[in-house]
Image (cartoon, helix red, strand yellow):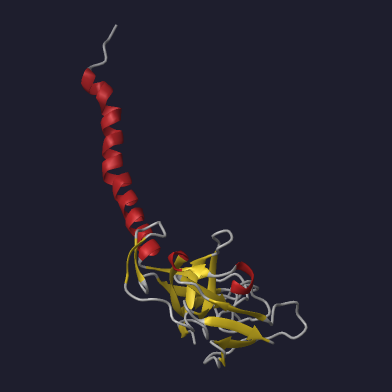
Amino acid sequence: MSKVRGSDRDRPVQRIRSFVRTQVAPLALMLVILGSFRSAVADWNVVPSGSMNPTIVEGDRIFVNKLAYGLRVPFTTWYVTHWSAPERGEVIVFGSPIDGTRLVKRVAAVPGETVELVNSQLFINGLPVTWAHPILLTPGTRSRPDFGPVTVPPGQYFVLGDNRDNSADSRYFGFVPVNSITGRSSSVVLSFDPATHLPRWDRTMKALP
């Protein structure tokens, strides 16, 4: 009866270890680095809804600068440091205060400001705001054209969708905490028509107003 030598028994284990060391480990490291970059530095988001029409339309892929306001620990909402704060008019990406769903809206009021909507006209600290970008109004829809006045607390933001009558925003879910804001968007990277799945070249690399 032949005996299996120790070196023969060890060969499968050695091959597995070699495969893990030469193939699996580099791939895992690359995925961790890529994931960390997308989590804390820059990413793009697919926009599935029309709440930001006409600025952002369904099928747009928007660039998200995740270093816009500070440095976060990858894969968390913890900020290591803040170096700037969202300003009124900026398009931000954040987790919904209700369920954490990733949302894209525009900052309408910052901490300390009193915000009010009267017949869809935005007032900040009692003064009407004229946006430098288009908004979409749809008369006859069941939206909230009147809201407030309310004062934005410290560390919170009031956001609105540009599609004013078809947007679940701070009128419905309340203020957005600064730590739930993951980044700022300033451009469309790519855009595909949801119906045909064909690229819309006129929207590719388009800056957001």
Left or right of 204 on screen, residue 24? left
* Location of residue 74 by image quarter: bottom left
Name the residue located 32 percent from the left edge and 57 percent from the top edge. 33
Q: Position of residue 66 (x, y in %)?
A: 39, 69
Res. 189 visible in picture: no
Q: Position of residue 17 (x, y in %)?
A: 28, 35
Left or right of 14 on screen, residue 76? right
How many numbered circles are shown? 0
Q: Position of residue 181 (x, y in %)?
A: 45, 68
Give the answer, above or below, for where 175 lies relative to 187: above
Which residue occupies the extreme top position in the image? Answer: 1
Give the answer, above or below, for where 156 lies relative to 149: above
* Location of residue 71 by image quarter: bottom left
Name the residue located 26 percent from the left edge and 38 percent from the top edge. 18
Left or right of 171 on screen, residue 29? left
Q: Quadrant of the N terminus?
A: top left
Q: Decide which of 203, 128 is in the foreground and name it.
A: 128
Q: Decide which of 16, 66 is in the foreground and name it.
A: 66
Which residue occupies the extreme right position in the image? Answer: 140
Name the residue located 43 percent from the left edge and 65 percent from the top edge. 179
Res. 3 visible in picture: yes
Q: Position of residue 84 (x, y in %)?
A: 35, 76
